[in-house]
Amino acid sequence: MSRPIKTGLDYFPMNVNFNDSFKALEELHGNDGFTWMVKFWQAAYKTQDGKVDLSGIRGVLMAKQARITPEKQREIIKDAKSLDLIEEYLPDFYTSDGIQKTLAKVNTERENGRIRQKKSYSANNNSSSPN
């Protein structure tokens, strides 16, 4: 039985020094902006593609997890978009360039590891046995 393919990350990289855009979001929204952004990263990095669905009940739940109102979340999203911290690729679906790059790298490394493992398994099981 083969191992299930891993989806997302168990942890994600978080800079010690935040960029000016992140600092601006925090300045505008205080701890609410900081917390929401971290919750967004957590949601994005759990997925294979780094895309977060904030439509309907999913958006309400995200706001609740960040301990803010859906209205406050809409303000934070608007500002995060204008600061290029996140981008909307479909209505109410968000990601970021950094998330996309990180997950692409991780997914490529995982795929290369599966290929190496498969080649190693094939080489070990297809070797000719002595007569």
Image: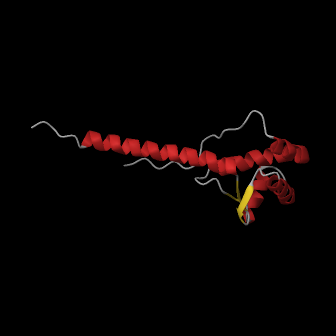
Q: How many labels were placed on the picture?
A: 0
Quick one: quadrant of the C terminus? top left
Q: Is residue 112 above or below residue 73?
A: above
Q: Residue at point 30% right, 44% down?
A: 122
Q: Residue at point 84% right, 52% down?
A: 68
Q: Nearer the viewer, residue 122 or 34?
A: 122
6 left or right of 57 in image:
left
Residue 77 in sight in this render: yes
Q: Residue at point 46% right, 49% down?
A: 4
Coloration mode = secondary structure
Q: Residue at point 58% right, 49% down?
A: 104
55 left or right of 21 in image:
left
Residue 43 in sight in this render: no
Farthest residue, direction left: 131
91 left or right of 5 in image:
right
Task: Give percent across and percent down for residue 124.
Answer: 27, 39
Farthest residue, direction right: 28
Residue 118: quarter of image: top left
Task: Give percent across and percent down for residue 120.
Answer: 33, 40
Task: Give percent across and percent down for residue 99.
Answer: 66, 48
Q: Nearer the viewer, residue 72 or 102?
A: 102
